[in-house]
Amino acid sequence: MRLRITRFMPWAAVLGAACTVNDPVATLHSPDAGTDVPDAWAEHCADSGPPLLLGNPASGPLLCSGQLAETLFRRAACSCEGLSLSAPFAVDAFRSSLGPYAPGSTGGDVGVNGGLSANDRVTVGGSLQVGGVQLSSPLTVGGSLDSNASLSGPGTSATVAGDARVNGNVVLAGLTVGGVLTVPPEFSPGSAQASELRREPVPAVTPCDCAEGSRFDPAALIAHHTVDNDNAAIGLDPATLGDVTGERLLELPCGRFLLTRIAGSGHATLRIRGRTALFIPGGVDLVEALTVDVQPPGELDLFLAGGFVVSGQLTLGSATLPSRVRVYVAGTQALDISAGSTLAGNLYAPQAQLNLSGNAEVFGSLFVRHLEASGAVRIHHDADVLDAGAACPAH
């Protein structure tokens, strides 16, 4: 498995979430560092610890990590540009708090700022908002459909359970809409069937906030917490995983921590048992493997810059609790994930292209600049991430 992420760019502004209480200090237990959790810190981290507040108070309101997650991961998939598919693509949703994922679930929204081009079947359990659609196989949408341009695919059909709004021609063998179909007067609805046809203007949609200056960019948080973190409180050396050989384990309870980089020829494991934010400005470069193990009541917000290469196996999170893992990437270099990896979390990389080789099953969500997939892709959105900010302080 090989995943690459590049170095960061400047961040214009912190996403507005006006948490105003002081950020608590947290602690670390690291078998590598040989430290134990002091009693005071263990008590502080009971029940996963307090909500994490991030950022520089001198630059504006602090950012509560849970609110950041529920803001950015509202959809199962978001593509800032286009979505090109050569194999089946299916999206649904579940709630990990109610039990493991089971096939047949509904929900799971998809947003594509550019065009959707598909050579195989596409099934979206929730809503689909897209710049335009070019189909070679059937499209099924369990919610509503919004398209800024035509629906094309003369030899195939589409089915939409809810309403459909198309700002262009419907050029399909068939379109079935369970609700209202809206097409502007200057365009043709073709042979579409709907409960009602309306001939009126269709507003443009931009489902994914990708514009420079308005999107969230992790770079400023990474830069700030390179110097403002909880390492000193518990004696964590930020270079402790800088030369990994053999098996290395680092266990982190609640708090904000810095690792300058994770690199070496061995297998590194991060074990998370509290509300934890981890900043890695120097990136990851591992030969053997990387395991990110997050178990209740733990939650991990991982902020990365400086490159990410895992030549062996990547295991990110658990398919039973994907809402508890959030990864934020600063940079533009493509991310390559090969078959056999475990991706069970929420990935935010609005400046990077994600390339999936082989068949891929994602538990969580993807927010990327562009998605390319050579095999079948299945995404199971853990809707519990929409409540990630429930513990954040009122503001």
Image: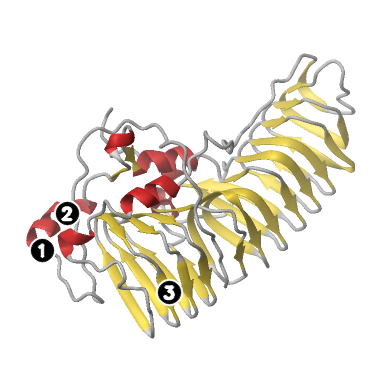
Tell which circle, 3 or 2, labels the residue nearer the N-terminal end: 2
Residue 150 screen position, x and y as percent: 82, 32
Q: State the residue position of label 2.
A: 46
| Kind of residue at badge 1 | Pro
Residue 89 screen position, x and y as percent: 69, 53
- Mark 1–mark 2 Cα distance, whole angstroms, equals 12 Å
> In which quadrant is the N terminus drawn?
bottom right
- Mark 1–mark 3 Cα distance, whole angstroms, equals 28 Å
Q: State the residue position of label 1.
A: 38
Q: State the residue position of label 3.
A: 263
**Residue that appears at 81% across and 53% down:** 119
Position of residue 50 relative to residue 313, above or below, is above
Q: Nearer the viewer, residue 95 or 203?
A: 203
For label 3, the SS is strand
For label 2, the SS is helix
Position of residue 31 relative to residue 92, above or below, is below
So how many labels did they put on this image? 3
3 or 2: mark nearer the eye: 3
Residue 314 screen position, x and y as percent: 50, 70
Tell which circle, 1 or 3, labels the residue nearer the N-terminal end: 1
1 or 3: mark nearer the eye: 3
1 or 2: mark nearer the eye: 1
> Which quadrant would residue 75 be assigned to in this image?
top right
Left or right: 367, with 81 as reference point: left
| Kind of residue at badge 2 | Ala
